[in-house]
Image (cartoon, rainbow, N blue to C red):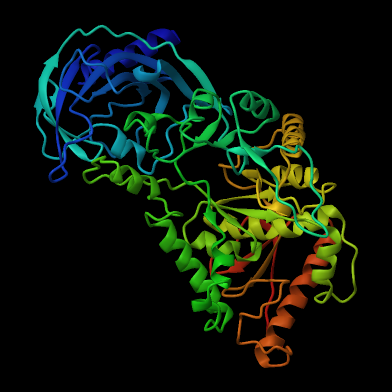
């Protein structure tokens, strides 16, 4: 039997078996599920398109249009066309798999299709439980009228069936295709640049830079350099929203987000770029560091602070955008709008494991890599002073980031700061990419922390050239086997800084707690030095009683005599 005939029979069998009928149209009115507030849409129209064979599977096209008024002639807030492996209106334990995802927003005259640059698969919006909340689903207990569910759940509210039609013409959208790379996010941390275009001397006195917002002409320059994640103001949004890049912005006031239309954009990723320095902020909190006594205190507090902040509607929280939209009058019913995919931005890289345990999806280290400073910091923990290579300095830091995030299936990266040795910065970016980093960022602002914009562009171009010449496997797949895991006891972290705030240790370093920590640090650094000498690809992680897999060798370090 010919392949085309087999596929045709498959599609016909799907239709005869009660599958969706092309051209069927269901018109719904909205029932609000928020007391004393209307739903943010008045009606929803759902239309079935043709069946299409993809990869030997009969897939169905369908379309959603939501309107602010219950008037078929009113312009829709948005129009979504998608092709999926099954009918989305049917409640099913089978996961809904997308084969195409296209969006039209009439107000902006945009028609866009979102695809992953690797493999060409559709890229969906980043919200937690997207299919559950953002697609209509047949409500439990709902009957059918003329083949359409009488009651559906949608965006936290309820849809009630008003009309079922037949033989509605299917008009495919003709989109601009955006191929996006969610596996490598290259970004500058602000929506402005310095006006000097060069480094300012920071001695004998620190100098701040003058800054100016990015304008339309700046964005093609940054896109060409390989930057693909932007923080934008509502005024700057129009320069990036239909480009193959990701962007962040708040709910806005004078130019608010178009709800729900803008949340169907797969390249709009929310309001939060990162959680700001949870470990550093803990150390600086007098309510903590004056009473915190044990290493395990710090580990537990970091994890719980991260979780509490992440699960909140605060400035660092995953529900920040939801809270802002509620303030603007958006009614969510029982829906939760969670921006779950963002990292922390942190100096204390050695606390990576405990931050990831708190729920964040990644960590970005504040990269101030300098060989002499590193040599001095680790010298007191090694048998002999060592002049490290720049690559060893980088691998040391990345071992904590990768080893602390891997147990949770999370991601890591680095951010280049002005204090980073400019000679090391290019390799810091390319090595991070080679080792599996997802985030490669730059810091903009604050005197000597700042990286001038021309340097950011040149570094981004260096990374772009490197990744084109050295494609890597997907970081979303199973991680490759590594040579060595150096494992420390749960509750500890290996810090080369002054741990004055861990008050179980005495200032002279002579009590039992200090002796245990010295043993742990010296043994761990001896193992690290040996790994350097043997050219091993190693991670540093925490023993949490799990089976540590994916390494050719596992070395557990203890603090015992």
Whether 425 is drawn above or below 219: the answer is below
**Residue 68 in which image quadrant:** top left
Depth check: give the residue in front, 425 or 350. Answer: 425
Depth check: give the residue in front, 55 or 272. Answer: 272
Residue at x 32% of width, y 8% of height: 171
All told, the count of numbered labels is 0
Left or right of 491, for residue 553: right
Whether 495 is drawn above or below 217: the answer is below
Left or right of 534, for residue 18: left
Depth check: give the residue in front, 251 or 226. Answer: 251
**Residue 78 in which image quadrant:** top left
Residue 133 placed where, x, y %?
29, 38
Depth check: give the residue in front, 475 or 395. Answer: 395
Residue 281 placed where, x, y %?
55, 66
Residue 105 placed where, x, y %?
37, 20
Residue at x 69% of width, y 71% of height: 495
Residue at x 60% of width, y 85% of height: 503
Whether 116 is drawn above or below 166: the answer is below
Left or right of 357, for residue 198: right
Residue at x 40% of width, y 56% of height: 314
Left or right of 321, for residue 181: right
Is residue 120 visible to the viewer in this orientation of the structure? Answer: no
Image quarter where the C terminus lies is bottom right
Image quarter where the N terminus lies is top left
Is residue 370 visible to the viewer in this orientation of the structure? Answer: yes
Residue 445 placed where, x, y %?
65, 48
């Amino acid at each position: 039997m010919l392949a085309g005939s087999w596929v045709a029979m498959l599609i016909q069998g799907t239709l005869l078996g009660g599958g969706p009928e092309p051209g069927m149209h269901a018109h719904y009115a909205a029932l609000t599920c928020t007391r004393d507030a209307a739903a943010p849409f008045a009606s929803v129209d759902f239309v079935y398109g043709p069946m299409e064979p993809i990869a030997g599977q009969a897939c169905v096209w369908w379309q959603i249009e939501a309107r602010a008024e219950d008037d078929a002639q009113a312009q829709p807030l948005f129009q979504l066309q998608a092709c999926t492996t099954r009918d989305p209106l049917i409640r099913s334990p089978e996961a809904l798999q997308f084969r195409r995802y296209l969006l039209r927003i009439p107000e902006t005259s945009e028609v866009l299709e979102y695809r992953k640059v690797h493999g060409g698969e559709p890229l969906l919006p980043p919200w937690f439980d997207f299919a559950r909340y953002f697609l209509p689903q047949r409500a439990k207990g709902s009957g059918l009228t003329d083949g359409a569910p009488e009651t559906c759940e949608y965006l936290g509210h309820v849809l009630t069936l008003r009309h079922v039609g037949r033989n509605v013409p299917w008009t495919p959208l003709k989109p601009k295709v955006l191929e996006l790379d969610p596996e490598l996010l290259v970004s500058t941390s602000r929506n402005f640049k310095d006006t000097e275009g060069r480094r300012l001397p920071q001695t004998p006195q620190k100098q701040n830079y003058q800054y100016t917002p990015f304008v339309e002409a700046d964005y093609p320059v940054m896109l060409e350099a390989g930057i693909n994640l932007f923080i934008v103001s509502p005024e700057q949004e129009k320069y990036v929203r239909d480009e193959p890049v990701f962007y962040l912005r708040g709910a806005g006031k004078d130019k608010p987000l178009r709800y729900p239309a803008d949340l169907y954009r797969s390249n709009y990723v929310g309001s939060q770029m990162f959680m700001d320095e949870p470990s550093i902020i803990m150390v600086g909190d007098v309510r903590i560091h004056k009473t915190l006594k044990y290493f395990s205190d710090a580990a537990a507090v970091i994890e719980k602070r991260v979780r509490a902040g992440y699960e909140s509607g605060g400035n660092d929280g995953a529900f920040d955008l939801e809270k802002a939209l509620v303030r603007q009058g958006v009614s969510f019913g029982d829906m939760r709008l969670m921006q779950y995919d963002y990292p922390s931005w942190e100096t204390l890289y050695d606390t990576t494991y405990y931050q990831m345990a708190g729920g964040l999806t990644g960590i970005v280290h504040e990269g101030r890599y300098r060989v002499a400073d590193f040599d001095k910091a680790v010298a007191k923990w090694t048998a002999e002073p060592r002049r490290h290579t720049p690559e060893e300095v980088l691998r040391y830091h990345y071992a904590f980031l990768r080893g602390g995030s891997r147990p949770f299936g999370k991601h890591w990266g680095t951010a280049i700061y002005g204090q980073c040795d400019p000679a090391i910065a290019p390799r810091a970016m390319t090595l991070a990419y080679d080792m599996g980093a997802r985030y490669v960022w730059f810091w903009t602002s604050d005197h000597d922390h700042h990286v001038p914009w021309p340097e950011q562009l040149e570094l981004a171009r260096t990374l772009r050239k490197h990744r084109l010449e050295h494609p890597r496997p997907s970081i979303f797949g199973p991680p490759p086997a590594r040579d060595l895991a150096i494992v420390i006891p749960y509750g500890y972290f290996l810090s080369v800084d002054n741990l004055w705030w861990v008050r179980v240790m005495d200032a002279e370093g002579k009590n039992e707690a200090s002796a245990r920590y010295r043993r742990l640090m010296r043994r761990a650094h001896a193992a690290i030095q040996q790994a350097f000498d043997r050219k091993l690809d190693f991670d540093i992680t925490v023993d949490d009683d799990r089976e540590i897999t994916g390494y050719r060798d596992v070395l557990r370090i203890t603090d015992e005599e």
